Image (spheres, helix red, strand yellow):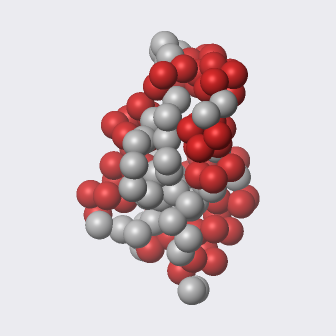
Amino acid sequence: MRKGIAYCGLDCEACDAYIATRTGDQALKEKTARLWSELNQTEIRPEDISCQGCRMEGVKSVYCAGLCPIRKCAQGRGAETCGSCPEMEGCGILGPILKSSPDARKNLTEGKNR
């Protein structure tokens, strides 16, 4: 599976934190920090918006590095992604991502067949 696909199946390379990190776009870091602060109901600063991808080498955003329960679970199980987990379909942690992002499900299920 392509390294740009996160454990949950989302495409890191389409994430604003990844894009802002790769391009050095400070305005996008600020916009993303505001949005993520609202979504997570905590302060996230623009300097916290640095990420080179969930499964790739390099810096991770504050959320991905230490808070994401999906990443923690997959790493704890030694899974390449959630697509290799036999409990993927009934998973309460991954369920909201699969429900809201058909592309994530597609990335995970297609990745199993490669």
> Foreground residue, 61 or 96?
61
Give how far across and how far down residue 70 sits, in percent.
Answer: 43, 49
Residue at 49% of width from left, 41% of height from top? 51
Residue at 33% of width from left, 49% of height from top? 72
Would residue 69 be seen by someone viewing this image from the given angle? yes
- The outermost residue toward the front is 24
Give how far across and how far down residue 34 sits, in percent.
Answer: 63, 17
> Foreground residue, 76 or 87?
76
Would residue 92 be seen by someone viewing this image from the given angle? no
Q: Is residue 91 left or right of residue 99?
A: left
> Foreground residue, 105 or 28?
28
Which quarter of the figure has residue 10?
bottom right
Identify whether 69 is placed above or below 39: below
Give how far across and how far down residue 107 sits, in percent.
Answer: 63, 68
Give how far across and how far down residue 104 sits, in percent.
Answer: 64, 59
Classify the position of the C terminus by image quarter. Answer: bottom right
Residue at 68% of width from left, 49% of height from top? 14
